[in-house]
Image: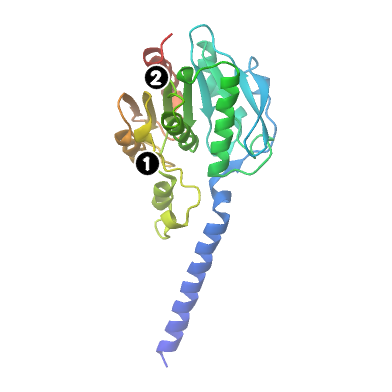
Amino acid sequence: MAGRPMLQLIAVIVGAYVVFMGGLHVFQRNMMYFPSTAEPHPARSGVPEMTPVDYTTADGLTLTSWYREAGQGKPTIVYFHGNAGHMGYRGFKVRPYLDDGLGVLLAAYRGFGGNPGRPSEQGLYADGRAALAYLAGRGVPSGRVVLYGESLGTGVAVHLAHEAATAGGGPVGAVVLEAPYDSMGAVAAHHYPYVPARTLIKDRYDSAAKIGTVAAPVLILHGERDRTIPIKFGRRLFDAAQEPKESWWHPRAGHEDLYDYGADEAVIDFLGRRVGP
């Protein structure tokens, strides 16, 4: 008889665990994406020279991004931001590139910054393809395009660079990855070791399986004090990338403060050498 209460307790614990895992599976996108629905404005974000532009995704969403064309002989950065806020919060990050004469397209995501739709892995890939199609329509060749990914956006940048390298349309000019990961499943398993996160996760962003096909110079930026996406994930992705590749590991930087330590200078130097006039 003494064993029955113990069995009941175990059943309750197992049941609660199953319910918890079910909740993680159902609501995981709410834990991955934290969009601000407020509509940003270039001037308020410190980039008044950028112009709002609209383009339509393959699944019919019209997205508003910001664009400033490149100066003579300069490439164009397509900036894919992280999982929170909206593109307006990245104005300070692209400010140095605008000042250097680089073209910049701050690429919008569905569900962020007043844009329609709900974010997902395949949805963000579609948004990225629409951004590249917009630049192609403006006469910007793929070899003059730099795919810049920040945090979650590194998965978008790697996927699009992989598609460019394998679809026969010609590789992009370069890929810059700020605080990247090898796969979102690996990051989820790191933060939730008590659940089978790799199995439950829907949006995998498996960059490690794709970056080896990227036929463009790659620069990876990562802080050794990053607790959100620890630097070990960035190092794994760097190891999986082809040459030519470069890294910028900063001993004091965390996840969101790489620009406080000169990451923008490293990017400008890299692009000047790898994607010249």
Label 2 crowd bin: few (<14), some (14–19), many (20+), radius 10 Å = some
Q: Residue at x 44, y 23 (%)?
A: 172
Q: Position of residue 121 (x, y in %)?
A: 53, 43
- Identify the residue under disc 2: 266
Q: Is residue 133 above or below residue 239?
A: above
275 left or right, relative to 38 = left
Q: Quadrant of the C terminus?
A: top left
Q: Position of residue 219 (x, y in %)?
A: 37, 25
Q: Taking the image as drawn, is residue 246 in sight?
A: yes
Q: Amino acid at mark 1?
A: Ala
Q: Position of residue 242 (x, y in %)?
A: 31, 30
Q: Amino acid at mark 2?
A: Ala
In the image, which is nearer the foreground, mark 2 or mark 1?
Answer: 1
- Identify the residue under disc 1: 209
Q: Residue at x 42, y 30 (%)?
A: 177
> How far apart are the alpha carbons under marks 2 and 1?
26 Å
